[in-house]
Amino acid sequence: MSTTDSAERGLILHNVTIWLNGRTLLSLDATVRPGEVLTVMGPSGIGKSTLLAFVGGFLGHDFRAEGRILLNGRDITALPPDRRSIGLLFQDALLLPHLSVGGNLMIGLSPDIKSRAARRQAVAEALAEVGLDAFADRDPATLSGGQGARVALMRTLLARPEALMLDEPFSRLDAALRQQVRRLVFEEARKYGLPVLLVTHDPADAEAAGGRIVELG
Amino acid sequence: MLRLFPIAAFFVLIAPVAAGLAGVFLPAFGYLPVLGRSAVSLDAFADVMAMPGLGRSILLSLGSGLAATAISLLVVTLFVAGWRGTRVFAALERLVSPLLSVPHAAAAFGLAFLIAPSGFLFRLGAEATGLLERPPDLLIVNDRLGIAMTLGLIVKEIPFLLLMTLAALPQTRAGEMERMTASLGYGRIVGFVHGILPALYGQIRLAVLAVLVFSTSVVDVALILGPTTPAPLAVRILTWQQDADLAMHFTAAAAAVLQIGVTVLALVIWLIGERVFGFVCRVVALSGWRARGDLAMRRLAAFVMALSAAIVLAGLALLALWSVAGPWRFPDPLPAGFSLSTWMRMPGSIAAAFGHSLMLAGASAILAVVLALGSLEYRVRSARPGPGRALGVLYVPLLVPQIAFLFGLQILFSYLGFDGAFLAVLLVHLVFVFPYVLLSLSDPWWAWDPRYGHAVRALGRSPDIVFWRVRLPMLARPVLTAAALGFAVSIALYLPTLVIGAGRWPTVTTEAVALASGGDPRLIGATALLQALLPFLGFAIAALVAAFLSRNRRLMRAGA
């Protein structure tokens, strides 16, 4: 990828404005440095997920958007979603029920790692990183909510994204677990130097993220 | 009282099939006391095996059925994978229902008019190049490999499978899964295969198997487009059934059992294919192959999809053109003049058939809707309201080759002196109409918010009031659509009308198919067009009535 000088590293939303049927939904101008979290807050239905859709490349035809998205100096505004290198985490883990836990991670793992042994090794390491050693052969249906969230996180990280987008990722977890998973996600993002865009309606998420907070609506 | 509805529904779905299978298995093994035979023997099977070209007939049924099913499923899957949520998708989605309502026979005739050596495409080619003065001597329609027949099946099964896919997609979390796979860097098609297809295929599997069963034993399309020397197995069974020599009934019965075996073999091959495909998908998933550059494949899928729609629509246009064509010499792409004489001198038999079609389709659609509403309302008032597992039963008549159980049923009915009776034909129409009506009604029925009913019940009104005054009026549009679908299904039925009707209730469809061997393109065009227009008429009336009922109710117009 085109790494330029360090000033441009990170996720930059440059003068972004999104309209729906002629009505302005949101306007945002922000820079998220590697390892930083930008939290977007606000009640439901005011365009939080629209912002994620725009950054991720999933915006529907009804919307009109202006502005540019730069990721590590690369203009990704017009790229299709699969070429943006932005990892997504959802409310649900969305593990594929027909694959094992290890298989779900291999789906994330880059195809550049070719040999079976190396792929297994990478998956085992990823599982160990989140305290799920020896889970590779498990059926994802047998995982607890927290375990599923950790597998989903590692699946995303194994694809070597350059940024993370989190769409209310902790809201389905119960309170105790939420804190634990939240800490893990932010730690991992810092460790890999990923800029994070977090969308939430939970003030505790924003507080834990510790970064800049943008209120929409 | 309400309890009678599910019982009647179960009877309609199971009894004719069970009785029909019994009625074909017994004579196949030599047992048919009416004809004075009651000694169990395998003679009939020996007779079938001795029929010339039998192996080729079997291979034709097997090959064209498997090919038609696999290709139409492949096209639909690639198209949905590549274009879901786009404008291209929305545009083709709108064509699904009209294409689905075109009967198989009309689509097959249209295809023949398009691709035959004297057909439209060769005329265009001859006009452009000036090379041909006469239609080339090629066997394109009725080709020995059954390619035209397979093509005719594909263009009709694609809209059916697309419709089933569209209905199943909401249950697959397709939107989230697509974002998930895309964010991992997967191209649209492979992302769809990993994230959505497993859940989707589980939902449409019975419909796919029904397509396979239908395609391995189809008769009307085969009579129009299929090979003749020899014909596919199902066509030959029909010929033997209609033989004046009653001894041939035993041969036909044994051949019908053989047809069941051929269809089961096709199912087994398909199920093995499912496993192999699933295994390959898992291996590919574990390799992490992203398959990002899939735009060419996506475009190809959209092209094939649009082409299959264009083939059916062009076919319909050619039917219309032939029905009003005056002199039309090869290689002129258009007739030299137009005339209504084909329509004016239409034989009286077709007018009578038109009446029979209307009666059968109208009556079976209304009966099916009443039966479906009663069965659904019974489920609503049961201890555990919900669609339940009973929906699988709907597929029973669709998973048994028609030719097999209809023949058995005809033997049974003739024994009871019931064959050729209007009620008998109506009953077998209901067997095929009811599953589609209930499948179409089920989703909107259960999507209806039960709190409307709770609110009315809380006012002290009875469940009957809720049904008649709240639920039914609110669901008027889907109920009318289901009725129109049932009407369309009945119009298109060929084999049930022919076999059970004993020739006494010819419909537009049986008349049209009967013209296949005659070769008067103008009369074929007019009759097949009539056949294709009747379902449209049903849907148009349903839409008009729905619009009238909701004329001052804005929210009712958005619904379903």
Image (spheres, grey):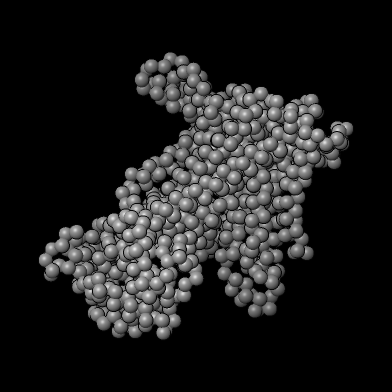
Q: Looking at this view, is A144 or B105 the one in front?
A: A144
Image quarter hosting the N terminus of chain B: bottom right
Q: How many marks do you count on the picture?
A: 0
Residue A49 image position (x, y, % from top left): 35, 69
From what the image shows, is residue B216 above or below residue B336? below
- The answer to whether residue A212 is seen in the rendering is yes
Would you say B283 lies left or right of B70 here?
Answer: left
Residue B345 appearing in the image? no
Q: In which quadrant of the rendered view does residue B442 lie?
A: bottom right
Residue extending farthest top: B133
Quarter-of-image position of residue B390: bottom right
Q: Nearer the viewer, residue B182 or A22?
A: B182
**Residue drawn at (64%, 38%) of the image:** B262
**Residue B444 screen position, x and y as percent:** 57, 61
Residue B157, x across and y down, in percent: 53, 43
Q: x%, y% of residue B189?
A: 39, 51
- The residue at the far left in this view is A5
The front one of B217 and B340 is B217
Where B36 falls versus A6 (above or below)? above
Residue visible at 51% across and 65% down in the picture:
B555
Left-right relation of A192 to A45: left
Q: Residue at x 47, y 72 (%)?
A: A143
Q: Quadrant of residue B84?
A: bottom left
Q: Is residue B531 left or right of residue A1?
A: right
Q: Residue at x 53, y 59 (%)?
A: B560
